[in-house]
Amino acid sequence: MTEITSQPRRSFDPALLPAVLTLAWPTMLEQLMQTAVQYIDTAMVGSLGTAATAAVGATTTINWLIICIISACGIGFLSVIARASGAGDAQMVRRASAQAAMIVLIAGSLFTVLATACSSLVPAWMQVDEAIRPMAGQYFLILYLPTLFRAASIIFGTVLRAVGDAKTPMRAGVGANVLNVILNFLLIYPTRTVHLFGRSFSCFGAGWGVAGAAAASAISYAAAGIVITSALWKHPALSPRGLSLRPDGAVLRPWSRVAFPLMVQQFATCMGYIVFAAMINALGEISTAAHTIANTVESAFYIPGFGMQNAAAALSGAAVGAHDRTRLRALGHTIRTVEVSLMLVSGALLFGFAPAMVRLFTKSPAAIALGSTVLRMVACSEPFYGVSLVTEGMLQGAGQTRVPLLFSLTGMWGVRILGTFLCTRVLGLGLVAAWGCMIANNLLVFTLYLIYLLRGKLDALADGS
């Protein structure tokens, strides 16, 4: 874990920036590559038509549900390992790593069976247009065949970040994403003539279309999982080699206190996303395509937020493990200041370039106009969402996941879902109103976290409160 000198100041502290950025920038770069590949995937599939785009995007929220639950397992281990590292307990760090391997085997196998068994039913649950349900079901099936490797990549990557190693997951992610792009090029399109540097030549193509995009992603997930697993087994501080993979109560009890509330939060939130997406899918193909594209575009502008959230979780966990309230307070002020600054810039860019970004993925004038409108709306809420992300990350690292659970459920189901239902099903409004409800959800959660911070609840966690 990167060492941080305790500071008495409550305001922005430049001395903490090296530690924060050391953890944040590899995660940002990794997510930038993931987003770039997502852009390329969407653009390549988009060239096949709006039906193909809708088929890929229609089951995205189920994907979020599964991945968020697996991620919650990883965050639980991050909290245990970061606090053990801050307290100087090297043996507990390795034991937690071994338990992470056990959870990877259980969760990866379970979700592989569940997802593949339900692949033909998911499009119907999501109220996808009947004409594209077979295509959407096939995409979902192929995507989830390597879930065991995907679970290893997510959980082991989080475990590595818990001890300050954000570069290994970054390298594995970048390599997998490059592989994904190459395979997309070869599997989506048929054999065709390519013109390059004034010369023409025949390029092999499998011509699998949407199924080719799914296969490319599945292979890249498997590759990342293998690389991350190998790195964990060789890591001097984390390697579970020689340790038992049987349940260890000393690790699983504190893990469960973090992971289970977070799983409930992620499950309830993702179920909200599913209900939200189903209501949007019911608005028609153009709304579904515009929503899918807007989500893809928006994801790039959240990269600073998620990078800083990971840094906040690891560093705050170490501060709580060391019972250093001053360090925890200084970290909070510093990370939030940097985060808001970054999200102000990303929000301004999103607002200014929204139409150009949407045009990368579709030629439909209706989808371009609709996607641009909702993106400019959400751009205005970026800084507020960034504060929520960082504060939630600090709470996760400190082992406090009940507060994020409460705030998330209140915003998702009390504002976004109820509001979208009233707007789309009762008042007959469209995608713009639905995204307005989503933004209202983000603003409410920001307000709740702000009140929590002003009351000093976060700082008190370093005292065991």
Image: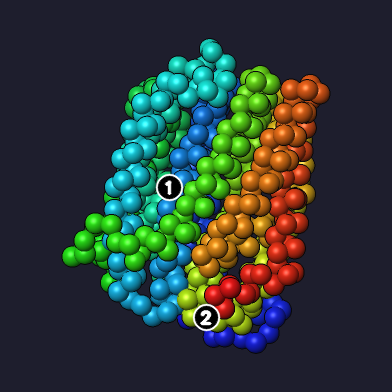
Residue farthest top in this picture: 131
- Which quarter of the image is occupied by the C terminus? bottom right
* Helix, strand or loop for disc 2: loop
How far separated are the C-alphas under marks 2 and 1? 29 Å
Label annotation for residue 147: none
Tell me if mark 2 has few (under 14), some (14-19) or many (20+) residues whose alpha carbon lies within 10 angstroms of its own.
Answer: some
Residue drawn at (65%, 87%) of the image: 8
Query: Which residue is nearer to you in this view: 80 or 315?
Result: 80
The answer to whether mark 2 and mark 1 are in CB contact below 8 A is: no
Q: What amino acid is labelled 2 in the image? A: His
Image-quadrant location for residue 383: bottom right
Residue drawn at (40%, 68%) of the image: 81
Give the mark, 2 or 1, whose residue is nearer the N terminus: 1
Q: Which of marks 2 and 1 is in front?
A: 2
25 up-or-down from 462: above or below: above
164 up-or-down from 271: above or below: below
